[in-house]
Structure formats: structure tokens, C-alpha cells
Amino acid sequence: MDLAALFEGVSYTGTLPDVSDPISVVTQDSRKVRPGAVFVCAKGRQTDGHDYAQKALEMGASCIVVERPLGLPCEVQVENGRKAYAILCQNFFGWPARRLRLIAVTGTNGKTTVTTLIQQALQQLGHRVGLIGTIHTMIDTMEVPAKYTTPEAWDMAALLSRMEAAGCDFAVMEASSQALDQMRLWGLEFEVGVFTNLTQDHLDYHGDFEHYYQAKKSLFEQTRQAVVNLDDAYGARLVKELQDRQPVMTFGVQNEDAQVRAEEIQLSAGGARFQMLCGVHKESLAFPMPGSYSVDNALAAACVLSALGTPWHEIVRVLHATRGVRGRCEVLYAGDFTVLCDFAHTGDAIEKVLSAIAPFVKGRLIALFGCAGERDAKKRPAMAHAVSCYADFAVLTSDNPRKENPFSILESVEKDLKEGGKPYLVEVERRTAVRKALSLLKKDDVLVLCGKGHEDYQVIDGVTIYLDEHRIVREWLKENHLQ
């Protein structure tokens, strides 16, 4: 590809360099520069790409894209490097995003489940679907490991190109607040955008709730239709701010003004049954995931399918056929006792999981959890409080301490856990903690492993180590002749 074609749709000042060799890559990472590369400079929170521009030239970059003049040869100036980078990446791959029907889901909780439900439902309807999210990326039926919830612009364009080549007609993705703030999705147009909820998370990045909300809201500047949770206070605000700009479909359980609602909800350890109402339509739905929040997720997916023109009887049929999501209230063992695994790693998420399960526990509800290091420490008391409110016994352990002292994390959380008055034990090594928790189980008890979910690793002192709770549980069950 030549530079003129690469810069189509990008506003810039200066003259494009006269480059004879084809462009080989577009990157913001100077370590990935090679001859023929276009290196895009943008200022981040910790580093500034402009500091690496000279190095990129020395490594063979054909063009340097800058936000401010550096006086370098082959320099092209743009107003916003991140926005330009996203467009350049799509141009390089021939804009696959324009030939796919894009759906994005944003919110604190529920993104992974809702995107997976939409993917599975669309497959049931005969579509080939790409999925981009926290657990993995799917290119039709081929699984690709996920590095970020929402990939960088180059990886996003490359994945969409592979999805198109595989015959996909839909791409469903999670849109994280960091990705939206960093313009990774800039230039993409989504047929439907979904807002699930907004609770405390990522405030270490955004600073406060308002900036967090604005990052989420920015998705809907790129959507044709919006699906919004009206039960959520920020969702209700979003509806008011969007109502004159694009069609909005609302869902909810508590708010009677929601267009799609659930009534006669029956919850059990095996899932949820309810009546789904939309105008004159009333359909019975049996949903294979437990918890009241699973009703919200099912309603969100149903709204997306309706926005795409799917008849309601077909929506019910395909949602009936959906499967559970790895690491999302996933049953690892069900016998005399039950072991569940969930990605819940905020106070709100833990509360939703445990409150959903507690009514069906005949014995004790045991919750194992930890708090991540080098992340928003303000959410730790909320996590301890949620466990104290709903669990009969707690096991406090490590999550991803990163470079923060794990013993210091446990000490700070234990203070809040102790105030709850429930019995607990503390074990810093997570593998050992899981095994200790399993050994506590008696007939009719339920153990919920909170925090890791689908993850099969732990980050300690900057080093990523293998740790898969699914495997730990299987091995323990085998040792105890239960499997």
C-alpha cells in the first residue's frame, strides 16, 4: 500500500514523504518498527511516542506521524495521533469494519456474558460471527487468545480482516472504557451499542465516576441504535442524553418504563425462568445461567436481537439454546456440595453473584476472594463488605498482587472483613487457598471462587505464572475420589 491510500480520510498538514517501497506496518510501538513502517506518535499517561520518533526513523520508518512539529524528515502532523492511528490501521487492511455488522457492549459488569449470548444467538440464527472480548477472540469457530478486552487499533483491524476472510457477517465485541478513552475503536460504526451498567471500577485510570461515565458514553457517538439498562442510574441518564440523537431501546426489571421487561422471575441454582414482555409480546424464557443479573443479561441480548429485526418468538428460541460462559457463575462440580467459579472482582460483582446464589444454598455459602494489586484500592472495602453480607465463611487470598506487597493487601482487606463478624481464614498463596476452601466443604455447602473466572494465570511481582482454578479443582476432586 502507498502512503496516499493509507492516509485517505486522515486530515494532516505537511507533505507526504515520497516513499517508493510499500508500507509494511502501522504502529505506535517503536519496538515494532521495521523498514517501511509508519510510526504514529501519541502522548499517553506514562510515555510520549514523540520521544521515540528519532529512534523509529533510525530503524527504517518511512513516515512519522506527529501531533506537534519535531523537525524530523518524513514527518506528517495530525491533530490527534490516536484517532489517526485507528483510521490508518483500518485503511491498511482495506476497512473490513465497513463490510461487517458491528455490535459493541460497554458497561462495568455483564459485557462478556452479553457479547457471548449475542454471538451464540446469532449463530443459532445461521450467521457466522466473530467475537472479541475478555476471555478470548472467536473467528467464527476458531479461538484466538485475548490480550486485552478491546484490542489496540492495529490488532482490531487485523482481527476484523480475518473475520471477513472467514465468512463472518457479524462482529460482536466488548468495548472497555480504557479502549474508548484511547480511541482504539475510533472510526468504526456500530449497528447496535449496549450499555449494561456503571459501578465502581477502573477509577485508578479514570479518576472519578464522571470521567468513567463519559468514556462509556463516547461509544454511542458511533452507534446507529442504543440498548440501555434503565434500572441503572447512569443508564437512565444516558437514555435522556441520547433520546434525540438515535433510536434507544431500554430494558429492565425494576423500572416499569423499560420497553423490554421481565416479570414472574423464578431463580434457581440451575438458571432463571421469567416472562419477557415487550409491548404486546409476552414470551416465557428459561435461561441456563443463575442469578438475577442473568435476567438483565438475557434482556440485553434480546433487545439487540430485536434491534436487528429478529422476531420475538425466534429470540426466545435462540436464547433457550444458549450455553453458559466460562468463568461466569460456572459450575465446576455439583454433587453433595457445589463449586462455582466467577470472574467477580469488584464489590458490586461479588454482591450480585453471592446474593443470587445465597437463597438456594441449603448448607453454608463459602466465598473465596482476593483484591488486585496496583489497582483502585477504594473498591477493596466494598468487596470485603459484600462477602461479609452474604457468605457464611470467607477465604481471603491473593488475586493479582502485581508489584504490590500481597501481605499488605491482605492486611488492609482483613480489617474490613473482620468488621463483618463472619468466620474467615487468610492464605496468601491462592492455589493453597483454593485447596483449603475445598477441604472445608460439607454436604449441601456451596463454594464460590471469586475473581479469576476464565483466567488461568496470576501476576506476582511483575511475573505471570500459570494458575488455573478449573484444574486445581479437578485435581483435588480426583485426589478425593470425587471425579
Image: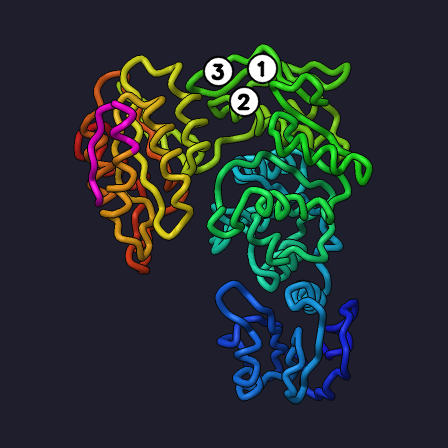
Q: Is residue 189 left or right of residue 181?
A: right
At horizontal 44% and vertical 20% (from top left) the residue drawn is 270
The quarter holding residue 232 reads top right
Disc nearer the start of the sequence (3/2): 3
Q: Secondary structure at mark 3?
A: strand
Q: Is residue 197 magenta?
A: no
- Nearer-the-camera pick, 272 or 367: 367
Q: Is residue 423 magenta?
A: yes
Q: Is residue 68 left or right of residue 365?
A: right
Magenta range is 416-428
How many residues crowd mark 2 within 10 Å: few (<14), some (14–19), many (20+)? many
- Nearer-the-camera pick, 450 or 472: 450
Q: Which residue is mark 2?
A: 287
* Number of numbered tags placed on the structure image: 3
Q: Secondary structure at mark 1?
A: strand
How many residues crowd mark 1 within 10 Å: few (<14), some (14–19), many (20+)? some
The quarter holding residue 264 reads top right
In three-dimensional space, the C-alpha distance between marks 2 and 1, rounded to whole angstroms, equals: 8 Å
**Quick one: quadrant of the N terminus?**
bottom right
Tag nearer the camera, 2 or 1: 1
- Which amino acid, mark 1? Phe
Find residue 274 and name its label: 1
Q: Secondary structure at mark 2?
A: strand
Find residue 267 and name its label: 3
At horizontal 64% and vertical 46% (from top left) the residue drawn is 214
In three-dimensional space, the C-alpha distance between marks 3 and 2, rounded to whole angstroms, equals: 10 Å
